Amino acid sequence: MTLGAIVALLAATVVAGTAILFAAVGELLAERSGIMNLGVEGMMLVGAVMGFIFTVLTGNHWYGLMAAMAGGGMMAAIHAFLTITLRANQVVCGLALTIFGTGVSGFLGKSYQGTPITDPFRAVSIPVLADIPVLGPIFFKQDVLVYISIIIAALLWLLLFRSRWGLSIRAVGQNPAAADAVGISVSRVRYFCTIMGGVLAGMGGAYLSLAYAPSWQENMTSGRGWIAVALVIFALWNPIRAILGSYLFGGVEALTFRMQTAGVDISTFYLAMMPYLLTIFVLVLVTIRRRSEAGAPAALTVPYHREER
């Protein structure tokens, strides 16, 4: 494989991993506050269809992105109300949210299948940086959402580990009773983190329908929401590791496409399985090697009620 082919593959890796990165950092934020949201797949689908519909109607992809963020946020708000206010089981609510989001997105987008989009996100080269050999084409000749995803992950790392707000979020996820005792509103922090996680998942869905493959197809996320949930564990709840993990999974997806176009004599079904086989392998590896290390927040999936302190 030539250097040019390797650079092209790595550039495609960044593109393929961006939607997963948006969803993963959103889920990571929610889980750091103690809320597990297995509805990421449904929120991404709602974000994808809302973003596509509003872009078609307005002719402006930024309006579509905002609609996707609102759609993902509203889905997450439902999850937050059920799990934080009503203290319903987080796993069951997340699964129900995925089923609901799949159905709603299919219904809303049915009449838009095959509709062309006139204003997708296109690649934007960053002056000077784009001319750097190898790194330039990989990182600095991408669409603006790729840059935004990396910035958001870096800012989330600063928020969680270098700010008082981040300390409050981690305290709520680790020991909500102690956080409540020092005056931190557990419900407020969890609502904020859960809804913002949904907003980011909606952005991940919008990336698929407005940049990665500008179109709308039912179930177009193809399990990326579930990969994002697994990636949070792989990243050990660290946003910087989430960047690397997202590109790892994106690289596997990009490689399968390259193998198909190169005419490799392997069944397309086996190639389609590769990202999910990697997901299972990574989860097993992390479970074995990281069992004794600090990982998941102690209060993850545990509802909190002040009177039960």
Image (spheres, rainbow, N blue to C red):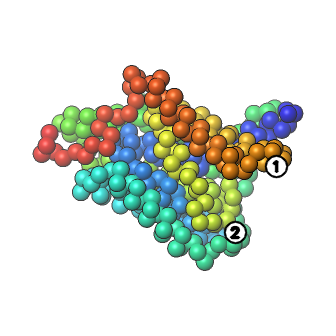
> In this rendering, does residue 70 appear at all?
no
Examine the image and state in which quarter residue 176 appears: top left
Residue in the picture at 40% in, 29% down:
295
184 in relation to 115, above or below? above
Residue in the picture at 52% in, 73% down:
107
Q: Quadrant of the N terminus?
A: top right
Look at mark 1 in the image and give the residue it sits on.
261
Q: Position of residue 42 (x, y in %)?
A: 48, 59
Residue 124, which numbered label?
A: none
Q: Position of residue 152 (x, y in %)?
A: 53, 43
Q: Amino acid at mark 1?
A: Thr
Residue 117, which numbered label?
A: 2
Between 256 and 84, the one nearer to me in the picture: 256
155 in relation to 49, above or below? above
Spatial separation of the CA atoms under disc 2 and disc 1: 25 Å
Q: Amino acid at mark 2?
A: Ile
User: Alpha-carbon neighbours of circle 1 within 10 Å: few (<14), some, or many (≥20)?
Assistant: few
Residue in the picture at 59% in, 66% down:
218
44 in relation to 254, above or below? below
Could you say whether the residue bearing mark 1 is in a helix, strand or loop?
A: helix
255 in relation to 220, above or below? above
